[in-house]
Amino acid sequence: MIMIKLNKILFMLLSGLFLFSCNEEKIINDVEINEKFAIVVDSLNPKLMLYDTKDGIVANDKYFDVNGVNLGADVSKISEYGGMLFLLMPTAYKIEVIDKFTFKKLATIDFSADKLEPSDICFANSTDAYVCHGNDTTLSLVDIYNLQIARKIKVGRNPISLACAGNQIYVANLGDNTVSVVDSRTHKQEAVIAVNTAPCLVAASNDNEKILVVSIGDGKINKEKQKTAAKATFFNINNRTITSDLELGTLKTKAIDQYPVNLILTINDWAYIQTTTHLFRLDAKRESGINTLSSDNNSMIVYHKLRNQLLIVNNMRNKVKIANAGNAGEIKSFDINSQIRAIHPL
Protein backbone atom coordinates (compact mmCIF):
# COMPACT_ATOMS: atom_id res chain seq x y z
CA MET A 1 0.00 0.00 0.00
CA ILE A 2 2.84 2.38 0.90
CA MET A 3 4.56 1.53 -2.41
CA ILE A 4 1.35 2.32 -4.36
CA LYS A 5 1.02 5.70 -2.60
CA LEU A 6 4.68 6.52 -3.32
CA ASN A 7 4.19 5.63 -6.99
CA LYS A 8 1.13 7.90 -7.17
CA ILE A 9 3.05 10.77 -5.58
CA LEU A 10 5.99 10.23 -7.95
CA PHE A 11 3.61 10.14 -10.93
CA MET A 12 1.99 13.42 -9.86
CA LEU A 13 5.36 15.12 -9.42
CA LEU A 14 6.60 13.96 -12.83
CA SER A 15 3.33 15.03 -14.46
CA GLY A 16 3.62 18.46 -12.89
CA LEU A 17 7.19 18.85 -14.10
CA PHE A 18 6.14 17.78 -17.61
CA LEU A 19 3.28 20.27 -17.73
CA PHE A 20 5.51 23.01 -16.35
CA SER A 21 8.15 22.33 -19.00
CA CYS A 22 5.51 22.36 -21.76
CA ASN A 23 4.19 25.70 -20.56
CA GLU A 24 7.70 27.09 -20.44
CA GLU A 25 8.26 26.17 -24.11
CA LYS A 26 5.20 28.14 -25.18
CA ILE A 27 6.48 31.40 -23.74
CA ILE A 28 7.82 33.54 -26.58
CA ASN A 29 9.72 36.73 -25.86
CA ASP A 30 9.40 39.15 -28.78
CA VAL A 31 12.55 40.92 -27.65
CA GLU A 32 14.64 37.76 -28.13
CA ILE A 33 13.27 36.78 -31.56
CA ASN A 34 15.72 37.50 -34.39
CA GLU A 35 14.01 39.61 -37.06
CA LYS A 36 15.34 40.41 -40.53
CA PHE A 37 14.75 43.42 -42.75
CA ALA A 38 15.51 44.69 -46.23
CA ILE A 39 16.35 48.38 -45.94
CA VAL A 40 17.01 50.83 -48.77
CA VAL A 41 19.26 53.67 -47.62
CA ASP A 42 20.50 56.88 -49.26
CA SER A 43 18.46 58.62 -51.95
CA LEU A 44 21.47 59.75 -54.04
CA ASN A 45 23.33 56.43 -54.09
CA PRO A 46 20.71 53.88 -53.01
CA LYS A 47 21.77 50.59 -51.47
CA LEU A 48 19.73 47.57 -50.38
CA MET A 49 20.98 46.75 -46.90
CA LEU A 50 20.17 43.51 -45.05
CA TYR A 51 19.81 43.82 -41.30
CA ASP A 52 18.88 41.40 -38.56
CA THR A 53 18.32 42.20 -34.91
CA LYS A 54 20.84 39.59 -33.75
CA ASP A 55 23.89 40.30 -35.92
CA GLY A 56 23.19 43.83 -37.14
CA ILE A 57 24.09 44.68 -40.74
CA VAL A 58 24.49 41.42 -42.67
CA ALA A 59 25.09 43.04 -46.08
CA ASN A 60 25.72 46.69 -46.92
CA ASP A 61 24.38 46.35 -50.47
CA LYS A 62 22.84 42.95 -51.17
CA TYR A 63 21.39 44.08 -54.50
CA PHE A 64 24.85 44.95 -55.84
CA ASP A 65 26.40 41.80 -54.36
CA VAL A 66 23.91 39.56 -56.18
CA ASN A 67 23.28 41.46 -59.41
CA GLY A 68 26.58 43.27 -59.99
CA VAL A 69 24.88 46.64 -60.61
CA ASN A 70 23.61 49.44 -58.41
CA LEU A 71 19.94 50.06 -57.72
CA GLY A 72 20.37 53.33 -59.57
CA ALA A 73 17.31 55.20 -58.28
CA ASP A 74 15.60 56.19 -55.05
CA VAL A 75 13.08 53.68 -53.67
CA SER A 76 9.87 55.07 -52.15
CA LYS A 77 8.27 51.79 -51.08
CA ILE A 78 8.82 48.02 -50.97
CA SER A 79 5.81 45.73 -51.44
CA GLU A 80 5.73 41.93 -51.35
CA TYR A 81 3.73 39.33 -53.22
CA GLY A 82 4.34 35.68 -54.10
CA GLY A 83 7.95 35.54 -52.89
CA MET A 84 8.82 38.70 -54.83
CA LEU A 85 9.75 42.19 -53.65
CA PHE A 86 8.51 45.13 -55.71
CA LEU A 87 10.76 48.20 -55.33
CA LEU A 88 8.90 51.35 -56.40
CA MET A 89 11.14 53.98 -58.03
CA PRO A 90 9.00 57.02 -58.95
CA THR A 91 11.86 59.27 -60.07
CA ALA A 92 13.03 56.59 -62.53
CA TYR A 93 9.47 55.72 -63.69
CA LYS A 94 9.89 52.02 -62.90
CA ILE A 95 9.50 49.15 -60.47
CA GLU A 96 12.34 46.71 -59.93
CA VAL A 97 11.19 43.19 -59.04
CA ILE A 98 13.56 40.94 -57.10
CA ASP A 99 13.40 37.51 -55.51
CA LYS A 100 12.68 37.84 -51.79
CA PHE A 101 15.09 35.05 -50.82
CA THR A 102 18.00 35.42 -53.26
CA PHE A 103 17.60 39.14 -54.10
CA LYS A 104 18.24 38.33 -57.74
CA LYS A 105 16.61 40.76 -60.16
CA LEU A 106 13.61 39.18 -61.91
CA ALA A 107 12.27 42.04 -64.03
CA THR A 108 11.91 45.77 -64.52
CA ILE A 109 8.37 47.09 -64.93
CA ASP A 110 9.11 50.17 -67.02
CA PHE A 111 6.77 53.18 -67.23
CA SER A 112 9.38 55.56 -68.66
CA ALA A 113 7.84 55.77 -72.15
CA ASP A 114 5.01 57.86 -70.68
CA LYS A 115 7.00 59.15 -67.69
CA LEU A 116 4.53 57.62 -65.24
CA GLU A 117 5.57 57.62 -61.59
CA PRO A 118 4.61 54.47 -59.66
CA SER A 119 3.09 55.86 -56.46
CA ASP A 120 1.50 52.74 -54.98
CA ILE A 121 0.76 49.10 -55.79
CA CYS A 122 -1.76 46.49 -54.65
CA PHE A 123 -2.39 42.87 -55.59
CA ALA A 124 -5.98 41.98 -56.41
CA ASN A 125 -5.38 38.27 -57.06
CA SER A 126 -2.68 35.80 -58.07
CA THR A 127 -2.39 37.23 -61.59
CA ASP A 128 -3.11 40.96 -61.33
CA ALA A 129 -1.34 43.88 -59.71
CA TYR A 130 -2.52 47.46 -59.97
CA VAL A 131 -0.12 50.42 -59.97
CA CYS A 132 -1.30 54.01 -59.57
CA HIS A 133 0.59 56.96 -61.03
CA GLY A 134 0.39 60.13 -58.96
CA ASN A 135 1.46 62.34 -61.87
CA ASP A 136 -1.24 61.09 -64.26
CA THR A 137 -4.87 59.96 -64.52
CA THR A 138 -4.30 56.23 -64.96
CA LEU A 139 -3.64 52.92 -63.27
CA SER A 140 -1.43 50.29 -64.86
CA LEU A 141 -2.59 46.68 -64.76
CA VAL A 142 0.47 44.43 -64.38
CA ASP A 143 0.46 40.74 -65.28
CA ILE A 144 2.25 39.22 -62.28
CA TYR A 145 3.05 35.98 -64.11
CA ASN A 146 4.95 37.74 -66.90
CA LEU A 147 5.77 40.88 -64.88
CA GLN A 148 4.64 43.05 -67.78
CA ILE A 149 2.20 45.93 -68.21
CA ALA A 150 -1.05 44.52 -69.58
CA ARG A 151 -3.13 47.69 -69.96
CA LYS A 152 -3.93 51.15 -68.63
CA ILE A 153 -7.12 52.06 -66.79
CA LYS A 154 -8.56 55.58 -66.71
CA VAL A 155 -9.35 56.96 -63.24
CA GLY A 156 -9.30 60.43 -61.64
CA ARG A 157 -6.58 63.07 -61.47
CA ASN A 158 -3.40 62.29 -59.53
CA PRO A 159 -4.22 58.76 -58.29
CA ILE A 160 -1.76 58.57 -55.42
CA SER A 161 -2.87 55.63 -53.25
CA LEU A 162 -4.89 52.46 -53.72
CA ALA A 163 -6.20 49.43 -51.84
CA CYS A 164 -7.55 46.07 -52.98
CA ALA A 165 -10.70 44.70 -51.32
CA GLY A 166 -12.00 41.49 -52.85
CA ASN A 167 -12.55 42.12 -56.56
CA GLN A 168 -12.58 45.90 -56.13
CA ILE A 169 -9.73 48.38 -56.17
CA TYR A 170 -10.22 51.71 -54.41
CA VAL A 171 -8.11 54.59 -55.71
CA ALA A 172 -7.55 57.93 -53.95
CA ASN A 173 -7.53 60.66 -56.63
CA LEU A 174 -5.69 63.55 -54.98
CA GLY A 175 -6.39 66.04 -57.76
CA ASP A 176 -10.18 65.87 -58.04
CA ASN A 177 -11.30 64.90 -54.52
CA THR A 178 -12.70 61.52 -55.48
CA VAL A 179 -12.18 57.81 -54.95
CA SER A 180 -12.41 55.59 -58.02
CA VAL A 181 -13.76 52.05 -57.73
CA VAL A 182 -12.20 49.69 -60.28
CA ASP A 183 -13.49 46.14 -60.78
CA SER A 184 -10.75 43.52 -61.22
CA ARG A 185 -13.08 41.41 -63.40
CA THR A 186 -13.68 44.14 -65.97
CA HIS A 187 -10.51 46.20 -65.37
CA LYS A 188 -12.64 49.34 -65.61
CA GLN A 189 -13.67 52.20 -63.37
CA GLU A 190 -17.17 51.23 -62.26
CA ALA A 191 -17.93 54.05 -59.80
CA VAL A 192 -16.67 57.39 -58.50
CA ILE A 193 -17.19 58.52 -54.89
CA ALA A 194 -16.89 62.19 -53.89
CA VAL A 195 -14.76 62.67 -50.77
CA ASN A 196 -13.08 65.46 -48.79
CA THR A 197 -10.42 67.72 -50.25
CA ALA A 198 -7.17 66.07 -51.37
CA PRO A 199 -7.62 62.36 -50.58
CA CYS A 200 -4.11 60.99 -50.24
CA LEU A 201 -4.34 57.61 -48.48
CA VAL A 202 -6.72 54.65 -48.67
CA ALA A 203 -6.88 51.27 -46.91
CA ALA A 204 -9.31 48.35 -46.65
CA SER A 205 -10.34 46.69 -43.40
CA ASN A 206 -9.23 43.12 -42.77
CA ASP A 207 -12.76 41.78 -43.39
CA ASN A 208 -13.11 43.79 -46.63
CA GLU A 209 -16.28 45.44 -45.32
CA LYS A 210 -15.09 49.03 -45.05
CA ILE A 211 -12.71 51.48 -46.68
CA LEU A 212 -10.82 54.21 -44.85
CA VAL A 213 -9.88 57.33 -46.85
CA VAL A 214 -7.59 59.98 -45.36
CA SER A 215 -7.70 63.49 -46.85
CA ILE A 216 -5.26 66.38 -46.44
CA GLY A 217 -7.76 69.25 -46.60
CA ASP A 218 -7.44 72.65 -48.24
CA GLY A 219 -4.66 75.20 -47.87
CA LYS A 220 -1.74 72.77 -47.56
CA ILE A 221 -0.99 71.85 -51.17
CA ASN A 222 -2.50 75.03 -52.61
CA LYS A 223 -1.49 77.51 -49.92
CA GLU A 224 -3.54 80.31 -51.42
CA LYS A 225 -6.69 78.68 -50.08
CA GLN A 226 -7.90 78.81 -46.50
CA LYS A 227 -6.85 75.82 -44.42
CA THR A 228 -9.37 73.11 -43.62
CA ALA A 229 -9.11 70.04 -41.41
CA ALA A 230 -7.47 66.78 -42.42
CA LYS A 231 -10.08 64.03 -42.21
CA ALA A 232 -10.52 60.26 -41.91
CA THR A 233 -13.61 59.00 -43.74
CA PHE A 234 -15.10 55.50 -43.55
CA PHE A 235 -17.16 53.94 -46.35
CA ASN A 236 -19.29 50.82 -46.36
CA ILE A 237 -18.02 48.68 -49.25
CA ASN A 238 -21.38 47.10 -50.05
CA ASN A 239 -23.37 50.30 -50.62
CA ARG A 240 -20.49 52.81 -50.85
CA THR A 241 -22.02 55.17 -48.33
CA ILE A 242 -20.14 57.24 -45.76
CA THR A 243 -20.47 55.79 -42.25
CA SER A 244 -18.13 58.20 -40.42
CA ASP A 245 -16.32 61.43 -41.25
CA LEU A 246 -13.81 62.35 -38.54
CA GLU A 247 -11.41 65.25 -38.14
CA LEU A 248 -7.84 64.04 -37.79
CA GLY A 249 -6.91 65.79 -34.58
CA THR A 250 -7.56 66.29 -30.88
CA LEU A 251 -8.14 69.26 -28.57
CA LYS A 252 -4.38 69.82 -28.36
CA THR A 253 -3.42 68.68 -31.86
CA LYS A 254 -5.51 70.59 -34.37
CA ALA A 255 -6.76 68.77 -37.47
CA ILE A 256 -6.39 71.95 -39.51
CA ASP A 257 -2.59 71.75 -39.10
CA GLN A 258 -2.20 68.07 -40.04
CA TYR A 259 -0.71 66.86 -43.33
CA PRO A 260 -1.19 63.05 -43.55
CA VAL A 261 1.57 61.04 -45.24
CA ASN A 262 1.07 57.42 -44.21
CA LEU A 263 -1.74 55.03 -43.25
CA ILE A 264 -1.78 51.53 -41.76
CA LEU A 265 -4.88 49.49 -40.99
CA THR A 266 -3.99 46.45 -38.87
CA ILE A 267 -5.64 43.03 -38.73
CA ASN A 268 -7.14 44.07 -35.37
CA ASP A 269 -8.75 47.18 -36.89
CA TRP A 270 -6.41 49.78 -35.45
CA ALA A 271 -5.71 52.58 -37.91
CA TYR A 272 -2.38 54.39 -37.58
CA ILE A 273 -2.15 57.69 -39.44
CA GLN A 274 1.20 59.41 -39.70
CA THR A 275 1.30 63.12 -40.46
CA THR A 276 4.36 65.30 -40.98
CA THR A 277 4.36 66.08 -37.25
CA HIS A 278 2.38 63.42 -35.36
CA LEU A 279 1.32 59.80 -35.15
CA PHE A 280 -2.38 59.17 -34.51
CA ARG A 281 -4.29 56.01 -33.64
CA LEU A 282 -7.94 55.47 -34.53
CA ASP A 283 -10.29 52.64 -33.58
CA ALA A 284 -11.38 51.55 -37.06
CA LYS A 285 -13.83 48.95 -35.77
CA ARG A 286 -15.87 51.56 -33.89
CA GLU A 287 -14.83 54.37 -36.24
CA SER A 288 -13.97 56.62 -33.32
CA GLY A 289 -11.42 57.39 -30.64
CA ILE A 290 -8.68 59.36 -32.38
CA ASN A 291 -5.73 59.95 -30.08
CA THR A 292 -2.21 61.29 -30.47
CA LEU A 293 0.54 58.75 -29.80
CA SER A 294 3.63 60.82 -30.51
CA SER A 295 5.00 64.04 -31.95
CA ASP A 296 8.41 62.68 -32.89
CA ASN A 297 8.46 63.72 -36.57
CA ASN A 298 8.73 60.09 -37.64
CA SER A 299 9.88 59.49 -41.20
CA MET A 300 7.68 56.48 -42.01
CA ILE A 301 5.65 53.65 -40.55
CA VAL A 302 5.45 50.17 -42.09
CA TYR A 303 3.22 47.27 -41.08
CA HIS A 304 4.66 43.80 -40.43
CA LYS A 305 1.42 41.89 -40.96
CA LEU A 306 2.84 38.42 -40.25
CA ARG A 307 3.95 39.46 -36.76
CA ASN A 308 1.30 42.18 -36.32
CA GLN A 309 3.92 44.79 -35.54
CA LEU A 310 4.71 48.34 -36.59
CA LEU A 311 8.07 49.50 -37.88
CA ILE A 312 8.46 53.17 -36.99
CA VAL A 313 11.41 54.90 -38.66
CA ASN A 314 12.87 58.14 -37.35
CA ASN A 315 15.68 59.37 -39.60
CA MET A 316 16.42 62.36 -37.37
CA ARG A 317 17.41 59.91 -34.63
CA ASN A 318 18.73 57.19 -36.98
CA LYS A 319 16.40 54.76 -35.25
CA VAL A 320 13.94 52.01 -36.19
CA LYS A 321 11.43 51.07 -33.52
CA ILE A 322 9.66 47.70 -33.62
CA ALA A 323 6.35 48.35 -31.91
CA ASN A 324 3.21 46.60 -30.75
CA ALA A 325 0.43 47.07 -33.33
CA GLY A 326 -2.16 47.50 -30.58
CA ASN A 327 -0.71 50.57 -28.87
CA ALA A 328 2.55 51.40 -30.73
CA GLY A 329 4.51 50.54 -27.57
CA GLU A 330 8.15 49.76 -28.22
CA ILE A 331 9.22 46.10 -28.25
CA LYS A 332 12.80 46.81 -29.27
CA SER A 333 14.72 49.21 -31.48
CA PHE A 334 17.92 49.43 -33.48
CA ASP A 335 20.06 52.16 -35.04
CA ILE A 336 20.86 52.64 -38.73
CA ASN A 337 23.39 55.40 -39.39
CA SER A 338 22.01 56.19 -42.84
CA GLN A 339 18.87 57.83 -44.13
CA ILE A 340 16.28 55.08 -44.58
CA ARG A 341 14.22 55.42 -47.76
CA ALA A 342 12.22 52.18 -47.49
CA ILE A 343 12.07 49.18 -45.16
CA HIS A 344 10.44 45.76 -45.44
CA PRO A 345 10.39 42.77 -43.04
CA LEU A 346 11.75 39.48 -44.39
Image (cartoon, rainbow, N blue to C red):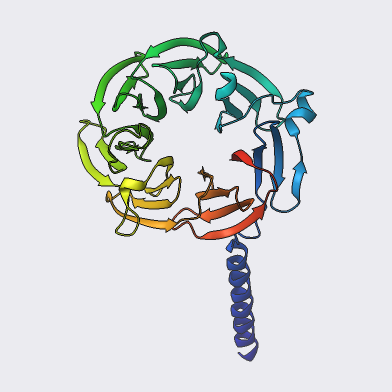
Give 18 or 332, whichever is nearer the viewer. Answer: 332
Quadrant of image for the N terminus: bottom right
Q: Is 259 located above or below residue 20 in the figure?
A: above
Q: Is 127 located above or below residue 251 in the figure?
A: above
Give 16 or 319, whichever is nearer the viewer. Answer: 319
Q: Give the quadrant of residue 29.
A: bottom right
Residue sitting at x 30%, y 42%? 231
Q: Is 223 located above or below residue 104 in the figure?
A: below
Residue 122, position as x, y percentages in the image:
46, 27
Residue 85, position as x, y percentages in the image:
60, 29
Give 271 or 273, whichever is nearer the viewer. Answer: 273
Q: Give the quadrant of residue 252.
A: bottom left
Q: How many marks?
A: 0
User: Residue 149, can we see it?
Assistant: yes
Residue 60, position as x, y percentages in the image:
76, 39
Residue 345, position as x, y percentages in the image:
60, 42
Quadrant of image for the C terminus: top right
Farthest residue to the bottom: give it: 2
Farthest residue to the front: give it: 224
User: Residue 266, can we see it?
Assistant: no
